[in-house]
Image (spheres, coloured by chain):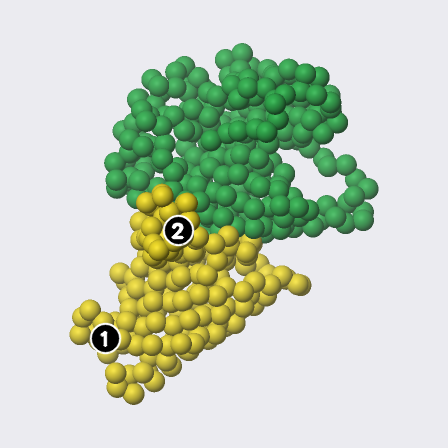
Amino acid sequence: MFATFDPEAPSLREYLGEMTWYLDAFFDRREGGIEVIGPHKWVTPCNWKFPAENFGGDLYHVQWSHLSAIETAFSSGVSTKPDTAGTMVSPGNGHVVICFGPNDSSDPPVPEILDYEQQIRAEVERRLGLRSALVNPFVGTMFPNFSMLRATSRTLRVWHPRGPEKTEVWSWIYIDKAAPPHVKEAIRLAGVRGFSPAGTFEQDDMDNWQECTRTCRGVVSRRSLLNTQMGLGHERFDDSLQGWVSDFRMSESNHRQFYGRWAQLMTGGSWAEMPPANSPAGASHA
Amino acid sequence: MREATIREVEQFLYREARLLDERRFHEWLELFTDDVRYWMAGRRNRYPKSSKAIATLDLDREVEEDWAEDVELAILDEDKQTLSARVARLDTGMAWAEDPPSRTRHLLANIEIEPGDAESELKVHSNFIVYRNRSETEQDFYIGARRDVLRLADGTRKIARRKLILDQNVLLAKNVSIFF
């Protein structure tokens, strides 16, 4: 699934580092892993970093951008509730994941999906190990442009840069291979209805990303630096989660890690000169 | 097919198109049966069965129809309840992809009517061009075919099934926030 033309690049395992556990929390929750359907392909007039950042750190857009879909029952909208636990996690190399607490999830109110998640919960926790008792990863970006989501819909996608202000999205719905057929069908429909070009969540995201891109082109906005200070100073390296972790669920700590790593790669030389995994990429640019 | 039936179906479809362009979505919803399946697929590249291209060694590609099967990934796959929820979402005042709303123009052509599987049903083929203009200079064309099943119940014509086939592989619009 992953390949590189760069002979100097680190191995995939090394590149992923601690992100491997977080990927497993999406794609290897049950024996047999996942199967995919799709892809949806569409072109959206935005810079590729906006969707990558959105999936990796933007939890605060949900309550405003997506309240219409939550209120009309396309999702349970857990992230809008004040008592929801959660944290930003950056396991290094610019990878960024948003986690709920272990008892929070944000599935659509579809009985087939909710029952299924209840039934497999113990099995998944055994498989993923102790860390799954601490956090429930539900959305994230594997640096730089591969994102995944397990709330509302189950989707993985690649944001292909197609030139200035043009991003081609390739998006698949993924489903546990071991899930029974009626659950697979419910997840297929939740994916089409939530996160797709016509998705009740995603159609509004495209509009956001387009407007963000356009706004950044303005004469006055180009004189300003992008502000990603939310939660600055409220982040730490967490040994049990093996990543940089925010104290609060609403934070731009992942933005700092994502763009910090991007800045390192854009200004750095060879791979050998890159700071090691798990160094606080954002700190030097804060 | 009786001339009167043809005219009646055409007028039904034109009126439906006008309801969409005038954003009268609640009235539009009433045109569907409670058991409707409203479905839209894009098209993808497949080699014809007669192709000598090396890619045809992949048996999966040897399919004449190049749109998704019913159980595959579609752009829209809705029932009456989710279609109604989509309309309710537009009413929240927070459905940003349609705020400001798209200006749409639904043009229908090539209307062809066949007997349906049941006495009360008709199969209706048509082609559509939907122009969407929004904000200042945004514009999209959605062009494709409809395969409808219309059903007569208690003297009222309703849409019992709508299959929309959009003639694009990579969707060239940023989103699909309108109805067809």
Q: Judge from the rendering whether residue A254 lies leftward or rightward of residue A178; answer left or right.
A: right
The three-letter code of the residue at mark 2 reads Lys
The three-letter code of the residue at mark 1 reads Pro
Which of the 4 image quarters holds residue A150? top left
Q: Which of the two residues, A146 or A253, is positioned nearer the viewer here?
A: A146
Residue farthest to the front, as pictured: B52
Give coordinates of residue B134: x percent, y percent. 60, 63
Label ID, residue B58: none
Q: Are marks 2 and 1 on the same chain?
A: yes
Colour for chain A in the figure: green
Quadrant showing the C terminus of chain A: top right
Above or below residue A236? Residue A179 is below
Which of the 4 image quarters holds residue B16? bottom left
Q: Which of the two residues, A110 or A161, is positioned nearer the viewer here?
A: A161
Give coordinates of residue A17: x percent, y percent. 54, 18
Residue occupying image coordinates x 50% and y 43%:
A170
Residue farthest to the left, as pictured: B119
Give coordinates of residue A46: x percent, y percent. 63, 47
Colour for chain B in the figure: yellow
The reply to whether residue A110 is in sight is no
Residue farthest to the bottom, as pictured: B3
Chain letter of the residue carrying label 2: B
Disc 2 crowd, CA 10 A, few/some/many (<14, 14-19, 20+): few
Residue occupying image coordinates x 71% and y 25%:
A264
Which residue position holds label 1? B115
Say what secondary structure mark 1 lies in.
Answer: strand
Which residue position holds label 2? B52
Above or below residue A114? Residue A24 is above
